Image (tube, grey):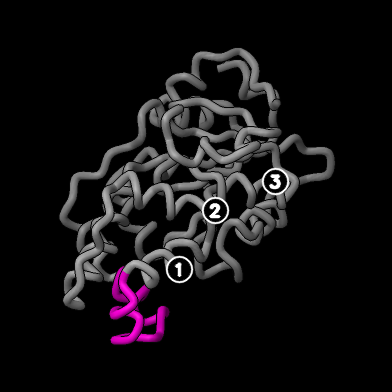
């Protein structure tokens, strides 16, 4: 993985990029609605197309889909807190897996000695459980969780915090995301973005989705290249 030598600082998302937890988030939203007496009629693909678009899109889409849920509980913060509880219950009971190609990528990154950091929308409690279950994640020395910054992606706050902690003048910085809202956060933080997602992901249908972005389907594909190019 000689391309690693192109960069000084590596910024990483967590859910759906390094760890296969996106389906658990989906199931947590289903559980939230179900335990409130509603059925969210979404496929996993539908969930991804909404959740990966923007910070407020999942809230807007669910409440438009289930207006009676909004009437039963108008405070989204309460609903979202319930969703987080359902997610953690699922997290504790499931086998966790790294996304394809992540293990050798993180091993190579650790061997390189390059600066690296995760900036995630997950809470410290969730991150602690995930790291405990997948020891390779402990090779990443710096973690920024949702409690440590103000606005979620696509706002750049998490990545700006990472740069504040780790970036030196003149550093070449690269960031990795599995969603376009994450890519927008990287771009807003002036970080070169790499998008890791399958080529048939609905988000790639957006006009100009890959402008200025390097795209790979998996880390396995990325690991095989000699140089990362941005278009």
Tell me if residue 150 is in the magenta stretch. no
Q: Quadrant location of the N terminus?
A: top right
User: On residue 119, which mark appears?
Assistant: 2
Q: Residues within 10 Å of mark 3 (few under 14, many from 20)?
A: some
Please, what secondary structure does the residue beneath circle 2 have? strand
Please tell me which of labels 2 and 1 falls first in the chain: 1
Viewer-side label of 2, 3: 3
Which corner quadrant of the image does residue 207 belong to?
top right
Tell me if residue 78 is in the magenta stretch. yes
In this picture, which residue range is highlighted in magenta? 66-83
Label 1 belongs to which residue?
60
Picture mark count? 3
Viewer-side label of 2, 1: 1
Q: Is residue 19 above or below residue 122?
A: above
Comparing 68 with 212, the one in front is 68
Position of residue 220 measured from the top left corner of the image (x, y, whole percent)? 43, 21
Which corner quadrant of the image does residue 42 belong to?
bottom left
Q: Main secondary structure of the magenta part?
A: helix
């Amino acid at each position: 993985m000689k391309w690693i030598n192109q960069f000084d600082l590596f910024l990483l998302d967590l859910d759906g990029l390094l760890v296969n937890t996106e389906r658990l988030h989906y199931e947590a939203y289903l559980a939230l609605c179900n335990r409130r007496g509603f059925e969210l009629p979404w496929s996993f693909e539908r969930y991804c197309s909404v959740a990966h678009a923007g910070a407020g899109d999942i809230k807007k889409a669910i409440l438009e889909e289930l207006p009676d849920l909004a009437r039963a509980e108008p405070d989204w913060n309460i609903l979202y807190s319930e969703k987080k509880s359902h997610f953690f219950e699922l997290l504790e009971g499931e086998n966790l897996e790294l996304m394809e190609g992540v293990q050798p990528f993180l091993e190579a990154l650790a061997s390189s000695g390059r600066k690296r950091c995760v900036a995630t929308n997950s809470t410290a409690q969730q991150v602690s459980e995930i790291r405990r279950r997948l020891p390779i994640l402990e090779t990443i020395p710096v973690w920024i969780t949702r409690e440590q910054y103000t606005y979620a992606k696509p706002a750049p706050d998490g990545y700006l915090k990472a740069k504040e902690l780790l970036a030196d003048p003149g550093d070449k910085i690269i960031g990795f995301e599995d969603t376009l809202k994450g890519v927008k956060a990287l771009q807003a933080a002036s970080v070169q973005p790499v998008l890791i997602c399958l080529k048939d992901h609905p988000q790639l249908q957006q006009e100009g989705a890959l402008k200025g972005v390097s795209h790979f389907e998996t880390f396995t594909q990325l690991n095989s290249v000699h140089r990362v190019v941005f278009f």
